[in-house]
């Protein structure tokens, strides 16, 4: 069966890798490099801070050159091979545990629809895609580890004790498969500590280069070694969400819209353990497809998202917005005040955005303006 939207866009997967910072006492509310403490009354509160892994694409990259992104890339046929079923069976990964990854209660965008019984379920194969790409681009190999799993059940584990660079190059160049790597190492890809996070689709206006991308999140207890692939990676960064956003606003780096959105909602979470608990609990809540729809304004551009008053009813993800210039002579603030429900990003230029959401986040997710109520034991 041919995928319904195959002629309109490609499928891909990305991985938000967050890792714990080393604890350090500091007297400011938010420090970009270290764990922090702040005085609340007479109590001292410790935040177990985290950093996010991103990299800058090279100038020769075909899609969004020089942009700073999370590791990820296009879905490959090896990701959906049924050969993985035998692989998991041989390593005592039960069919029941794999099936749990497919049991999602919320929205399922087109990318998660498995097109044939001859292919691996998309809830599994997209995780494999994200893991493979993270290894190809940055040498990060996340594997299951039962001993560490008992100690830190919500955290993933990065393997270093093998010839990373040689295998990375072989897989990147198509000389070996991701499954062959794990077979040689006797390891299992860490599917179960990869948490479904969101799903984004390039706006319809970019007809020639559109991607529907499933985003997953992995949480690490320490920052791993990185091996940047030279043809795709110009440089990489471990930074807090707030620091990356500040560098974007200062025009030191450029973050694509999905990255600014995801980093913005992560920037309101200061504790990595809290983030891990939240991601694990939200893992089966599903993902509403986030396909921005553009409106021109007198002082910039507005991209509306599902749940906003201006988002087209029953949007097909293919059609142009016929109301693109409906508010072209009206300032963004005036347009905003005319709306009851907001879920939008207002752009002044490529480096300056403002985020608005005045109702509950979709799919029980983090609030884009930080209005989160997260129980300690969520």
Image: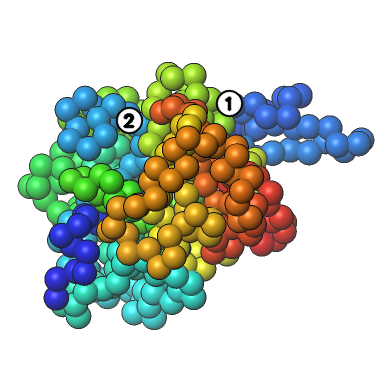
Q: Give the quarter of the figure containing the C terminus.
A: bottom right
Q: Is residue 120 left or right of residue 243?
A: left
Real-space CA distance between mark 2 and mark 1, rounded to the nearest whole angstrom: 23 Å
- Residue at the location (23% across, 27% down)? 58
The number of callouts visible is 2
Q: Is residue 211 visible?
A: yes
Q: Give the quarter of the figure containing the N terminus.
A: bottom left
Q: Residue furthest right?
A: 42
Residue 297 in percent (x, y) is at 47, 36
- Residue at the location (39% across, 50% down)? 323
- Residue at the location (43% across, 46% down)? 326
Residue 160 in which image quadrant: top left
Q: Is residue 147 left or right of residue 49?
A: left
Residue 9 badge: none
Residue 33 badge: 1
| Residue highlighted by disc 2 | 67
């Amino acid at each position: 069966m041919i995928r319904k939207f195959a002629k309109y866009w490609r499928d891909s997967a990305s991985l938000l890798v967050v890792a714990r910072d080393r604890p350090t006492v500091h007297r400011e509310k938010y420090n970009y490099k270290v764990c922090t403490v702040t005085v609340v009354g007479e109590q001292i509160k410790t935040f177990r801070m985290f950093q996010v892994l991103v990299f800058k694409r090279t100038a020769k990259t075909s899609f969004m050159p020089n942009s700073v992104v999370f590791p990820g890339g296009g879905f490959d046929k090896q990701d959906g091979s049924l050969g993985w079923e035998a692989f998991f069976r041989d390593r005592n990964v039960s069919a029941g545990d794999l099936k749990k990854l497919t049991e999602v209660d919320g929205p399922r965008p087109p990318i998660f629809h498995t097109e044939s019984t001859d292919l691996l379920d998309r809830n599994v194969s997209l995780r494999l895609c994200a893991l493979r790409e993270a290894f190809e681009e940055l040498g990060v190999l996340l594997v299951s580890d039962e001993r560490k799993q008992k100690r830190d059940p919500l955290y993933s584990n990065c393997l270093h004790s093998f010839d990373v660079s040689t295998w990375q190059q072989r897989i990147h160049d198509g000389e070996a498969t991701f499954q062959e790597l794990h077979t040689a190492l006797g390891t299992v890809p860490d599917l179960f500590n990869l948490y479904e996070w969101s799903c984004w689709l390039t706006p319809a206006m970019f007809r020639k280069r559109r991607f529907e991308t499933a985003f997953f999140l992995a949480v690490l207890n320490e920052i791993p070694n990185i091996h940047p692939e030279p043809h795709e990676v110009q440089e990489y960064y471990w930074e807090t969400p707030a620091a990356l956003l500040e560098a974007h606003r200062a025009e030191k780096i450029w973050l694509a819209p999905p990255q600014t959105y995801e980093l913005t909602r992560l920037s309101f979470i200061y504790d990595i353990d809290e983030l891990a608990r939240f991601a694990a609990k939200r893992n089966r809540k599903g993902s509403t497809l986030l396909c921005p729809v553009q409106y021109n304004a007198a002082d910039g551009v507005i991209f509306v998202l599902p749940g906003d008053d201006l988002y087209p009813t029953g949007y097909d993800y293919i059609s142009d917005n016929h109301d693109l210039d409906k508010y072209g002579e009206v300032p963004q603030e005036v347009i905003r005040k005319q709306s009851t429900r907001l879920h939008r990003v207002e752009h002044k230029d490529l480096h300056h955005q403002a985020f608005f959401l005045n109702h509950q986040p979709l799919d029980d997710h983090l609030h884009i303006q930080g209005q989160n109520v997260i129980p300690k034991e969520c």
